[in-house]
């Protein structure tokens, strides 16, 4: 699909892959309407994207929490007005957060918030923008799932239930849409994006959306709860060292990833241009897809994690 002179909607455009999608789409001459819960970061994305865009390309920024259907409908109406259009060509359902790892150890409200953003956000935006997509001569829905949409794990000792459940839902929905669109709107396609580890601030952004303190802001009680969770003895490491270690884990997720957000966005847009429904992002995602398909029964066994480590896909697995 050609990107020039099209209109795209991108959710979660404030940072990470969403920001890079907005910038690369705009640079290719595609007008973009982006939304996020973070107005400041989104405005920065808008300014960066507008600077690199050819004349006539519009980039608009909208405040919207994709897990709230009323906000999504207001976002759709604002897109219509800002771009003076009744059609859009591309919908990137990219917004997402982590969290809600365990049914036992995590707060139910957090679990449901994560599921709501990662699943209901995709569903509400697809429903809201569907008439505008169908009104275009050619259109595509691009849903970001994850490798956790086909492999529900972060490692043998790290529960990961809300995110995985939502990302599996996004995968199932997207694959089922292939037939629904073929029957009812064959000029609309769907792509399913499954990234491996991409260097973004998703860990810090998740904490902000869930109202959790950053490592630097953690109180003594927060740290005690973290110690219990990580089964650390009291006082070792001390509180300041523990804060620094937790910050390092967040920073390493962003800075030591095998793929940058810009490179991930380029892979996604190549897949969209080629009209592919299945877009694996990163060598780690390609490897994991192959290993899970080869022997699904073994996917959560210790030998599977050992094989992943042996093949260099360390970043996908949290230490046990
Ligand atoms: N980074 C990775 O390794 C990785 C791997 C697989 C899948 N993903 C998925 O890729 C997508 C993009 O993630 P990223 O890594 O670029 O993260 P990111 O945190 O850099 O970007 C996500 C953006 O979504 C926004 N957002 C969060 N909740 C929102 C809501 N309710 N409504 C609107 N916007 C909201 C955040 O403010 C942020 O700007 C997510 O769906 C994520 O689950 C990321």
Image (cartoon, grey):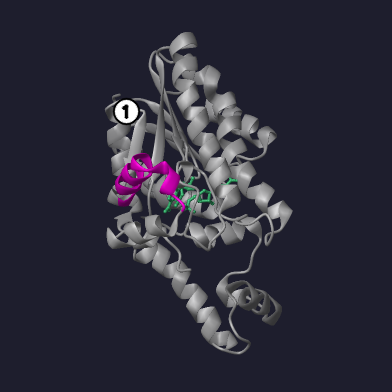
Label 1: element kind: loop
Q: Is 185 situated left or right of 256 in this image?
A: right
Who is closer to the viewer here, 37 or 194?
194
Residue 265 placement: quadrant:
top left
Location of the N terminus (image quadrant): top left
Residue at coordinates 42% horizontally, 31% vertically from top-left? Answer: 8
Against 170, residue 216 (above or below) is below
Q: Is residue 287 magenta?
A: yes
Q: Range of the magenta residues?
A: 284-300
Identify the residue under disc 1.
276
Give the main secondary structure, helix, strand or loop, of the magenta stretch: helix
Against 153, residue 252 (above or below) is below
Residue 308 placement: quadrant:
bottom left
Residue at coordinates 46% horizontally, 40% vertically from top-left? Answer: 145
> Do we see residue 87 in this rendering?
no
Who is closer to the viewer here, 246 or 130?
246
**Residue 197's x, y, as percent?**
38, 54
Against 9, residue 227 (above or below) is below
Q: Is 209 situated left or right of 176 in this image?
A: right
Residue at coordinates 36% horizontally, 61% vertically from top-left? Answer: 306
**Residue 246's x, y, as percent?**
51, 74
């Amino acid at each position: 699909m050609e990107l020039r002179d099209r209109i795209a909607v991108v959710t979660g455009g404030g940072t990470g892959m969403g920001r890079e999608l907005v910038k690369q789409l705009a640079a290719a001459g595609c007008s973009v309407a982006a939304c996020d819960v973070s107005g400041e970061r989104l405005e920065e994305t808008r300014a960066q994207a507008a600077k690199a865009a050819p004349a006539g390309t519009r980039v608009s920024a909208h405040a919207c929490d994709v897990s709230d259907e009323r906000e999504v409908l207001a976002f759709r109406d604002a897109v219509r007005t800002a771009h003076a259009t009744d059609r859009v060509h591309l919908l990137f359902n990219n917004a997402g957060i982590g969290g809600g790892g365990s049914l036992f150890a995590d707060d139910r409200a957090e679990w449901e918030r994560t599921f709501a953003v990662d699943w209901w956000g995709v569903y509400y935006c697809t429903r809201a923008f569907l008439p505008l997509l169908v009104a275009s001569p050619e259109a595509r829905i691009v849903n970001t799932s994850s490798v956790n949409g086909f492999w529900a794990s972060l490692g043998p000792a790290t529960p990961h239930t809300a995110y995985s459940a939502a990302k599996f839902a996004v995968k199932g929905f997207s694959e089922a849409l292939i037939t629904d669109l073929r029957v009812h709107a064959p000029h609309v396609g769907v792509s399913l994006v499954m990234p491996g580890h991409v260097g973004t601030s998703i860990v810090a952004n998740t904490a902000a959306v869930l109202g959790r303190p950053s490592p630097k802001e953690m109180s003594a009680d927060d740290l005690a709860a973290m110690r219990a969770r990580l089964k650390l003895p009291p006082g070792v490491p001390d509180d300041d060292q523990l804060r620094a270690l937790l910050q390092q884990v967040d920073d390493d997720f962003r800075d030591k990833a095998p793929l940058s957000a810009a490179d991930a966005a380029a892979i996604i847009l190549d897949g969209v241009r080629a009209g592919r429904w299945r877009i694996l992002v990163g060598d780690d995602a390609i490897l994991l897809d192959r290993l899970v398909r080869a022997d699904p029964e073994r996917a959560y066994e210790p030998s599977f994690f050992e094989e992943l480590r042996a093949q260099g896909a360390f970043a996908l697995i949290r230490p046990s």
